Amino acid sequence: MIGSQGQILLAMGSYMAVVIGIGLYYAKRASASSDYFLIGGRQLGPWVTAMAAEASDMSGWLLMGLPGVAYWFGLSDAVWTAIGLLIGTYLNWLFVAKRLRGYSYIAGDAITIPDFFSNRFKEEKKVLMTIASLFILVFFTVYASSCFVTVGKLFASLFNANYVSMMVLGALFVVFYTFIGGFLAESASDFMQGVVMIISLSAVVVTGISMAGGLSAVVANARQIPGFFEFFGIAQPVVVDGVQQVGANGQPLFGAAARYGFLTVISTLSWGLGYFGMPQVLLKFMAIEKTSQLTLSRRIATIWCAISLAAAVGIGIIGRLIYPAVFLTQSAAENIFVLMSAEFFLPVLAGFVMAGILAATISSSDSYLLIAASAFSKNLYQGIMRKEASDRTVLIVTRITLLVIAAFAMLIALDENSVIFTIVSFAWAGFGATFGPIMLFSLFWKRVNRAGAIAGMLTGGIMVFFWKLALKPLGGIFAIYELLPAFLLSGVAIVIVSLLTEEPSPEVQAEFEKARAYVS
């Protein structure tokens, strides 16, 4: 008879075998050309597009990071983040998806985000392409590291194993199947992983409500903790050296609730702005077969997002009530989904539920690695360094770059005490502020020019670092999420510089009008 840990491992192993099978199935098609390897030949259907976009977007952050925030601070921070993300998801699908699909095809059949920006402004010296590629390399390496942290925490917690060993093992698995399968494998497996994620989240939150005595009991008990179940207040765990203190009765200690003011709400809602610059989502828009299919994709994505985000927040709240003193650091709190899954279900079922974490992690990290690798191979290597490079050479360089980026991401992920939510929030802000404003202006403002695009991209990317490292520690108004000021300043820079410099060429403006009318 296999022990409980063996049954969990068997179930998760079965899931991983299916994912590898998908990679092997698409290996031949992925190797046909860089177009197939990087964007799947623009052949995705509406269901795969929707589920793959959301699964690759949310990552292990959805199953570990967000529940961890709710467990540690209560409702407000987690729920306002979730609301911002839901609004951002819907608006991105509504306004950006159709225009980007058509414009990316018309603008030289661009298959990467740096390609699109460079082709959109008809640049001869590939400055925009270089800037975009470098930012992608930096922020996606950080993003991939957050996924590896998730895998490490999952297996270390589940099997009481060494964190670093488990992190490296999980990272190698992700690299292996992304290496052989490319975009089609990533998108097909992301569809399956999106299904696994929503089922896992729903199963845990519904069982948790039952275990906690019903919804009314959850609300009543959560309100007993100061600020824990408030929209405009936030719980304050009493910590010493990062560890929450426990009272004589064995219950964790909380101080008086802190105020969650209007500025903080706006700051947290600004998470939604990140979607307009998120390459892993934007690429799915570019890869769908027909623009007419995007309406169905939008509905699927929005419903999936609403259910999944609500369940993730609920798991953190319920987990604190059922297991109040199990996790006494913010980093450890991100294991609440793992604990609830192991405690609520039979081992085999728990294994399949926790495969949801693997699903989330894999569906994101494969996207991050693939896009970052393509930024170097397709845009920097073939676009600038060796323009005569063959398509076969680009494929080889893509795979080598993927391995190098994964190695750097693993180095960043070596710290066992990393907080997934914190890592993701920084990379999210980086992409949102660097690419979001210029993506919107590129799609909807004919007057924007190359100089404005460069100014906006640099302003947004640099301001994320400056605000996070230099201004945010000052507190007060500077404590807001760095995405909001960086996004706004990037937009201002785009408008001012575009208006002060020469307007786009007639060719660029004519292409803009053609993209506006494009339907497929």
Image (cartoon, rainbow, N blue to C red):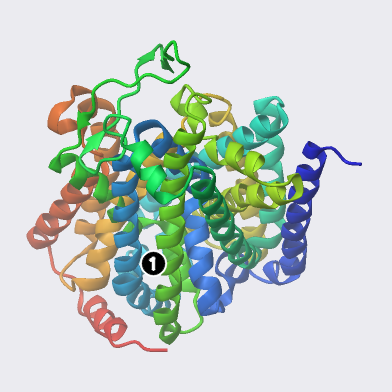
- Residue 32 lies, with reference to residue 85, above or below; the image says below
Point out residue 499 in the picture as x, y percentages from the top left corner.
9, 62
Along the line of sight, which residue is nearer the eye, 305 or 221? 221
| Residue 110 visible, this angle | no
The quarter of the image holding the N terminus is: top right
Point out residue 163 in the picture as x, y percentages from the top left corner.
65, 27
Point out residue 93 in the picture as x, y percentages from the top left corner.
36, 70
Mark 1, Cα crowd under 10 Å, few <14 / some 14-19 / many 20+, is many
Q: Residue at x 44, y 10 (%)?
A: 248
Q: Residue at x 65, y 70 (%)?
A: 33
Q: Please, what secondary structure does the residue beneath circle 1 have?
A: helix
Point out residue 473 in the picture as x, y percentages from the top left corner.
23, 23
- Residue 258 lies, with reference to residue 100, above or below; the image says above
Check disc 1 and report the residue beneath it: 116
| Residue 88 visible, this angle | yes
**In which quadrant of the rendered view does residue 190 lie?**
bottom right
Residue type marked 1: Phe
Along the line of sight, which residue is nearer the eye, 284 or 357? 357
Give the left or right position of residue 383, taking residue 398 as reference.
left
The quarter of the image holding the C terminus is: bottom left
Q: Residue at x 23, y 33 (%)?
A: 467
Along the line of sight, which residue is nearer the eye, 225 or 231? 225
Give the left or right position of residue 303, taking residue 462 as reference.
right
Give the left or right position of residue 67, taking residue 502 as reference.
right
Along the line of sight, which residue is nearer the eye, 270 or 118? 270
Give the left or right position of residue 230, taking residue 74 as reference.
left
